[in-house]
Amino acid sequence: MTPTRPRTLVAVAIACALVAWLVIRASFAQAPQLPWTAAPALLLLALAEAITGRNLKARIQGRVDGKPLAPIGVARAAALAKASSLGGAVFAGLAGGALIYALRYTNLPVARHDAVSTGITLAAAIILVVAALYLEHCCRAPSKNGRDDDHREQ
C-alpha cells in the first residue's frame, strides 16, 4: 500500500466542491438548512485518530511496554487512515462547495446559517484529513537506522 498523496485528496475535494456547488445552485430555494452535526463527528474521529497515531508510533518505536503489535492491527490502522483522509476530503469538498455558494447570499438568514455551518464543517474536515495523514505516517515501520521509511513506490 502506498502512502496517500495530497494531490489526490485535493482533486477529490475540488471535484466534490464542484458537485456540491452545482447541486445547491440548482436547489437552494427548496433545500432545508444545512445541519451542524457533521463537525462534531468529524472532530471526534480526528481526535481518535490522532491519539491512536501517537500511541501506535510509541509502540512501534518501543517507547511503551506492552504486548507486541500484531502486523494486521497496524495494517488496519493504515487502511482506516487512508479511508478517513479520503472521507475527510469528500466532506471538505462538499462543505467548501456549499460555503462558496452560501457566501454570496449572507444577507439572508438561512444562507448566513449555512455559511457558518459549512465553514465549521470545512474546518473539521480539514482537521480530520490532517489527523488521518498523521495516523498513516505513524503506521510506517522504522528502518534499520531508526528513521521512518519514506520510500514511495512509483
Image (spheres, helix red, strand yellow):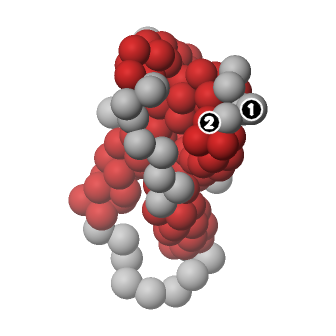
Q: How many marks?
A: 2
User: What residue lies at 25% left-to-right and 59% top-to-bottom?
Assistant: 72
User: What residue lies at 54% left-to-right and 24% top-to-bottom?
Assistant: 97
Image coordinates of residue 102 in percent, x first then y, are 62, 28
User: Label for residue 111?
Assistant: 2
The quarter of the image holding the N terminus is top left
Image coordinates of residue 96 in percent, x first then y, are 58, 29
Nearer to us in this view, 63 or 81: 81
User: Label for residue 115?
Assistant: none
For badge 1, the amino acid type reads Asn
User: What residue lies at 44% left-to-right and 87% top-to-bottom?
Assistant: 66
Nearer to us in this view, 123 or 29: 29
Where 90 sits versus 144, above or below? above
The quarter of the image holding the C terminus is top left
User: Label for residue 107?
Assistant: 1
Evaluate whether residue 117 shows in this view. Answer: yes
Evaluate whether residue 153 shows in this view. Answer: no
Furthest residue to the right? 107
Left or right side of 1 for 43:
right
Left or right side of 109 for 81:
left
Quadrant of the rendered image containing residue 74 = bottom left
Are the residues at dot 2 and dot 1 in contact (C-beta closer than 8 Å)? yes
Nearer to us in this view, 141 or 85: 85
Secondary structure at badge 2 equals: helix
User: What residue lies at 57% left-to-right and 81% top-to-bottom?
Assistant: 64
Image coordinates of residue 63 in percent, x first then y, are 62, 76
Secondary structure at badge 1 equals: loop
